[in-house]
Image (cartoon, rainbow, N blue to C red):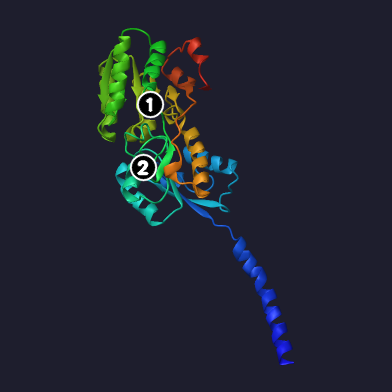
């Protein structure tokens, strides 16, 4: 009799425990994905971030079947426009032991110093090999892979577009900071075409206004603006100064035309962040960053802000307007 009661009790206990065990076995891991950049952290937070690039990344994840909060969450860290904060933010993310980190620009250099084990996806770097992030594009060889912005040869095309809307002998001012390679490439392209350039090097955020004053005093006809950290972070100020001094400008990144700049030609960084989701997907499924080739952009975009043209009292030739992929009215 005692043995029968023990058997029934054992069976009942097994029945009660089976569903719990089943739930445990079917529980799905919620991945944590670090997001790091120069914008304020508040712009990067949650499933509906204000940052267009982070929003594009989440759209890419959704297209791959991931649901925010169910399959993954983000751990955002933003420097609020202060590159000097990036080292501490990188240390925070690495300390959290997130599953993968997506970052761009100067954040990558800090992350590289902090970890050799956590997978890192580059959301656009001009030359990841020269920058030391990967050994080669075909075989990155470490914990970093992702997407490249391509070469600086696009500066030649940007100069050509400027000369189409502002023809003549006037020089082109080049606003740049910390990108000596980009400046030299632009010099070479201009020299081959017989065009004059004026170097307007910016030394930190405080030098932006001075660079534009110098451009106006030198009576340059137009501007080519690079997208280095202080210029990108202060995109609104840059676009506003170009309007103030009536200087037609072309930019490396789309953000500048979104905040009032005249023209953008190049790789849309929002597209890059969207494509970064495919790398994250592969890594979460077990792929090693060392074995995932770095992709280079295949699609270039030309965007014109017609409102900015009206502010500048500039008539853009119809042949140029027809080549634009997008016109902001």
Kindly identify which residue carries mark 1. Answer: 151
Q: Would residue 223 be visible to someone looking at this image?
A: yes
Looking at the image, which residue is at 37% across and 21% down?
155
The one nearer the camera, 281 or 42, is: 281
Spatial distance from mark 1 to mark 2, Cα to Cα?
Answer: 18 Å
Crowdedness near tag 2: few (<14), some (14–19) or many (≥20) residues, C-alpha within 10 Å: many
Q: Quadrant of residue 201?
A: top left
Question: Residue 139 at what x, y percent from top left?
Answer: 41, 38
Measuring from the top left, give residue 299's x and y in whole percent: 49, 26
In what element is the residue under mark 2?
A: helix
Location of residue 3 (image quadrant): bottom right
Mark 1 in CB contact with mark 2 (< 8 angstroms): no
Instruction: Name the foreground residue: 129 vs 91.
Output: 129
Work out which quarter of the rendered image holds the N terminus and state it. Answer: bottom right
Between marks 1 and 2 in the image, the one whose residue lies nearer the viewer: 1
SS category of the residue bearing label 1: loop
Coordinates of residue 71 in the picture (x, y in percent): 56, 52
Q: How many marks?
A: 2
Q: Which residue occupies the foreground of this view, 239 or 160?
A: 160
Position of residue 93 measured from the top left corner of the image (x, y, whole percent): 39, 52
Q: At 35% from the left edge and 46% from the top edge, which residue is drawn? A: 111
Most distant residue in the top direction: 168
- Compared with 172, 168 (above or below) is above
Q: Is residue 82 visible?
A: no
The residue singled out by tag 2 in the image is 108
For residue 31, above or below residue 310:
below
Mark 1: few/some/many CA within 10 Å (<14, 14-19, 20+): some
- On screen, residue 38 above or below 320: below
Residues 243 and 29: in front is 29
Q: Residue at x 72, y 83 (%)?
A: 8
């Amino acid at each position: 009799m005692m043995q029968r009661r023990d058997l029934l009790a054992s069976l009942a206990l097994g029945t009660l425990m089976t569903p719990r065990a089943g739930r445990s076995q079917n529980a799905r891991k919620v991945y944590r994905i670090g997001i790091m950049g120069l914008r304020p952290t508040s712009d990067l937070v949650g499933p509906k971030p204000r940052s267009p690039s982070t929003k594009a990344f989440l759209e890419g994840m959704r297209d791959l079947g991931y649901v925010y909060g169910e399959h993954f969450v983000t751990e955002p860290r933003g420097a609020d426009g202060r590159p000097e904060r990036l080292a501490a933010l990188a240390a925070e993310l690495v300390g959290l032991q997130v599953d993968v980190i997506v970052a761009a620009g100067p954040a990558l250099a800090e992350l590289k110093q902090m970890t050799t084990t956590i997978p890192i996806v580059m959301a656009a770097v001009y030359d990841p090999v020269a920058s030391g992030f990967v050994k080669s594009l075909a075989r990155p060889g470490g914990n970093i892979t992702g997407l490249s912005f391509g070469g600086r040869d696009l500066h030649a095309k940007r100069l050509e577009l400027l000369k189409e809307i502002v023809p003549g002998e006037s020089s082109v001012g080049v606003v740049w900071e910390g990108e000596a390679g980009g400046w030299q490439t632009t010099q070479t392209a201009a020299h081959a075409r017989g065009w004059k350039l004026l170097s307007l090097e910016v030394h930190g955020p405080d030098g932006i206004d001075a660079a534009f004053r110098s451009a106006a005093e030198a009576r340059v006809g137009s501007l080519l603006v690079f997208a280095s950290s202080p210029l990108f972070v202060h995109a609104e100020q840059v676009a506003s100064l170009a309007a103030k001094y009536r200087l037609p400008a072309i930019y490396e990144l789309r953000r500048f035309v979104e905040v009032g700049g005249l023209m953008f030609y190049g790789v849309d960084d929002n597209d890059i962040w969207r494509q970064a989701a495919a790398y994250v997907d592969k890594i979460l499924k077990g792929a090693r960053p060392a074995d995932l080739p770095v992709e280079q952009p295949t699609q270039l975009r030309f965007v014109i802000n017609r409102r900015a043209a009206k502010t500048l009292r500039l008539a853009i030739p119809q042949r140029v307007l027809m080549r634009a992929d997008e016109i902001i009215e």
